[in-house]
Amino acid sequence: MHVPSVTGFCLAILALIYAVLALQVARLRRNNLVLFGDADNRSLRSAIRVHANFIEYVPIITLLVALLEMAGAPPSRVHLLMGGLLLARLLHPMGMYARPTTWQFVVGRVAGILLTIFVLVSAAIGALFRFWPF
């Protein structure tokens, strides 16, 4: 069995990003004395959503790409998928902290989520073709 080293390396970087996002939520909770929820604090709400959005997409995409890598997908494809995921997950928080209609919002949030969905669908279609049982 091939160890998914490209996926593993990128996942380590994604884990560090996740840690930063988690610490941002913790910092805002501490500064605003909020134990649960967002206390109707816009900054905290954005941080919570960025953190949650990350964990909603990254595990399933990473699992799909790791399976593809272990099944012998071309390294260039694995690099593109994981590189796209890394870029998307860096762009998305930038947009979440910007005001709507600004270029930061469009480039960050919109491009980040579109790229995330593109990588998700690409990995899923690749897995369907690679693992088709018939």
Image (spheres, rainbow, N blue to C red):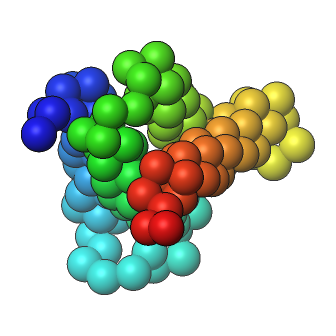
Nearer to the camera, 121 or 52: 121
Callout count = 0
Quarter location, residue 18: top left
Most extreme residue toward the top, as rendered? 76
* Residue 60, position as x, y percentages in the image: 39, 60
Nearer to the camera, 103 or 61: 61
Q: In the image, is 87 to the left or to the right of 99?
A: left
Nearer to the camera, 96 or 59: 59
Quick check: 57 above or below 79? below
In the rendered image, the quadrant that contains the N terminus is top left
Most extreme residue toward the front, as rendered? 134
Quick check: 10 above or below 18? above
Q: Is residue 109 visible?
A: no
Quarter location, residue 15: top left
* Residue 31, position as x, y percentages in the image: 29, 57
Q: In the image, is 94 to the left or to the right of 12?
A: right
Nearer to the camera, 56 or 20: 56
What residue appears at the point 24 percent right and 57 percent down from the top-left corner? 26
What residue appears at the point 56 percent right and 36 percent down from the top-left corner? 88
Quarter location, residue 97: top right
* Residue 100, position as x, y percentages in the image: 81, 48
What residue appears at the point 39 percent right and 81 percent down from the top-left corner? 37
* Residue 53, position as x, y percentages in the image: 49, 60
Q: Is residue 18 visible?
A: yes
